[in-house]
Amino acid sequence: MLPFGSQFIGGQPTAPNLLFITSTTTTPAAANIIVSNVLSVPSLNFPQLPSGPQPPPQPMLIAPNILNEIKAESSAGVSNGTSVWSQHTADDGRIYYYNKATKVSSWTKPDELKTKEEKELSVWKEYKTPEGKPYYYNTQTKVTTWSKPEALNKVKTILSFSDTKTKKEESDAANESKPDLVHLSSNSEIEKAMEATLKTLVVKKSDEPIEVKEIVQKKEEEEDDSEYNLKKRQVEKFREMLQDKCNEKRINTNMNWEQASKYIQNDPRYKILAKVSEKKQVFNAWKTQRYKEERDERRFAIKMAKEGLEKWLMAHPRMKPTLRYHKAEGIFAMELQWKAVTEPERREIFEDVKIALAKKDTEQKKALKERNIKALSDILDGIDKIDYRTTWAEAQRILIENPSFAKDTTLQGMDKEDALVVFQKHIKLSEEQYVKEKQLEAKRIKRQERKTREAFIQLLHELHDRALVTPASSWAQLYPMISADQRFENMLLTNGSTALDLFKFYVDDLRTKYHEDRKTIKEFLEFKKITFDESTTFDAFRQWVKEGSNSDQLDPVNVKLCFNDLCDRILMKKKEAERDELKKQKRAELAFWDLLRSLSPAVGPNSDWEQIKEQLKESGQLETTAEEEQLKRPFFDSFVKSLQDICGHFHSTVSSSSKKRKKEKRKKYEQENASDSEETPTKGKKRRRKEERSDEEEEEAEKKRRRKKRSKKRSKEETDEEKER
């Protein structure tokens, strides 16, 4: 708000012209000397002043808003008295700066008038990217940053605090003394006279008693208030008159005071202000304010016209994103909304509307596409006939028969390519779901088969605990017992390893475990130097084994088998000794026969033992001991018997009866050997070979056998897995 009396000269506002209505000065001898303003309005009645000492006259009242601007200008002039720059306010309220030396005006505050905080603030410049994102540039360090500098925030905080403090001080000063003196420039003669008068007044008043001072001060304040309110009402009435005349189109902001006074001087309110200078000052202030209001009204009207044109174009059916401006001029030339905006702004709005319509059309198409995709996907999910094997042609025939698809006309206009993409996604999901279900089913079957095999192995464990399954067991022996169990029947329904395979693997493991336990027991007996013979019982043997450190790891069934094996070995050794003895006797018999054949006269079928014995004694070929005679007598009898047989019915060949006896004897011998071998965990021949081999060789052979079994087992499992796949 410019102070009253401000005018524009050459496009720049001038300093305010402060006017006093009347100025009277009394002689120095007077009790109270002060320069004052006396208001004189003929049409108003002022109250009569009381008799006696009159209070000092008061200066002319000035509106507070004008007073603040005068203070700001005067303070700037005082603080920067040595500066060539001065601060002023334009009609629109913006502050500009004038250089007295160069006669140049500037909107930017010069560095000479800036405070320390303002200088720090001017180092940083704020800019914005095309997208509207702010960034900051330091003119001294040439540094650019996205974040707001801390120094900038601190300086702005200090400036805002100082501005708030200044405004508060000004408002407090205005409230404390509503009528204030208007200070003129330091070289004004009126100001000098006023200051001298005020000094004299202060000295005189200080000599008066305190009670008189208080009474005078109270009266002065009351008169100040009444004069201030009166002046304020006068100015408001005059401004109302100017506004009414403007509304009646009698005056406008383009008129000067001389032109406007011709149209308002006949109004009764024209004389409410006595002085022409006051009227002119109020008129200029009103004109400035009215000019701003008209400018704002024009801007608002232009803004509303732009918004109206934009809304009208957005809603017009003939407005398309592809429409060109020269064609639009021919279509909309006669429309009021089109003509209400100037051509450059109209073109700009037209292009903005085209972009907005194109964006809106794109969003609508995108929303329609998303809606159709979701609707088609829901329909496909609800049709059970469409699975991972359905073709696109079959799916189209099924969709035509679907009532939901037939009712949705928007969906029927869906782009074919988008529909095909949705169908492909649906088929892919269906296939993935099918594969997942198959995998789950395969896992379930595999888990069930594993449980079935574990149950069958548990059956074998139970039979082993009952000593029915041993390392020497065969499938043929145990099949009747195993086949009667339900767990064996469940094995018949599974793939992969059969019950026979599991049985063989189980027996192989038992054999391996048996050899390990037998080796452990043998080492323990050798370490303890325990002798095992025919008289050793199983209880004593088991008690010996329990004393070993690894007795807990031994299988009780294997302990029993080891005991039987040791017993069989003792019996075998005994039989071997007996066979050796028989062989020795046979050799002795044959040697004696040869001796008998060499005798002369020869021994005949009817020879007597006593004669032959004497003959042998005489020749020294037979010892005279009784034991020797008892040993040789059976040999002689068998020799004579053989001679008798030879001299029997069959003289040339061996009789069939002797062949038969030999055959029966051989068969009996083989049966005895077979029975001995069945009592041991392995066959007789293999056992004899193992006995002949050393423990190290036996251990190596056992390791080779285990590796061979494991490789066979692994290859069989891989074959079963391939079959399952």
Image: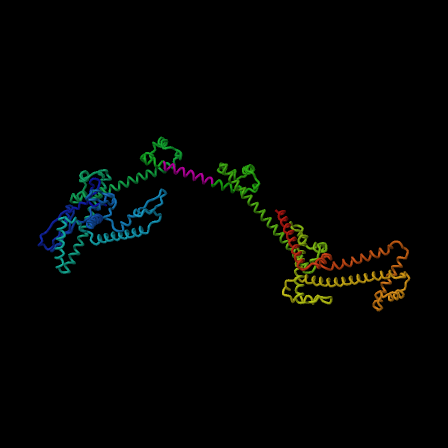
Residue 214, quarter of the rendered image = bottom left
* Span colored in magenta: 351-369
Q: Is residue 494 above or below residue 324?
A: below
Residue 659 place in picture, x, y as percent: 84, 55
Front-most of residues 184 and 84: 84
Front-most of residues 99 and 390: 99
Front-most of residues 394 and 446: 446
Secondary structure mostly seen in magenta is helix
Q: Is residue 350 left or right of residue 97?
A: right
Residue 609 place in picture, x, y as percent: 88, 65
Residue 176, quarter of the rendered image = bottom left
Q: Is residue 614 left or right of residue 94?
A: right
Q: Is residue 330 above or below residue 236?
A: above
Q: Is residue 73 magenta?
A: no
Quadrant into which the N terminus falls? top left
| Residue 489 visible somewhere in the drawing | no
Residue 48 place in picture, x, y as percent: 14, 52
Q: Is residue 361 magenta?
A: yes
| Residue 395 visible somewhere in the drawing | yes
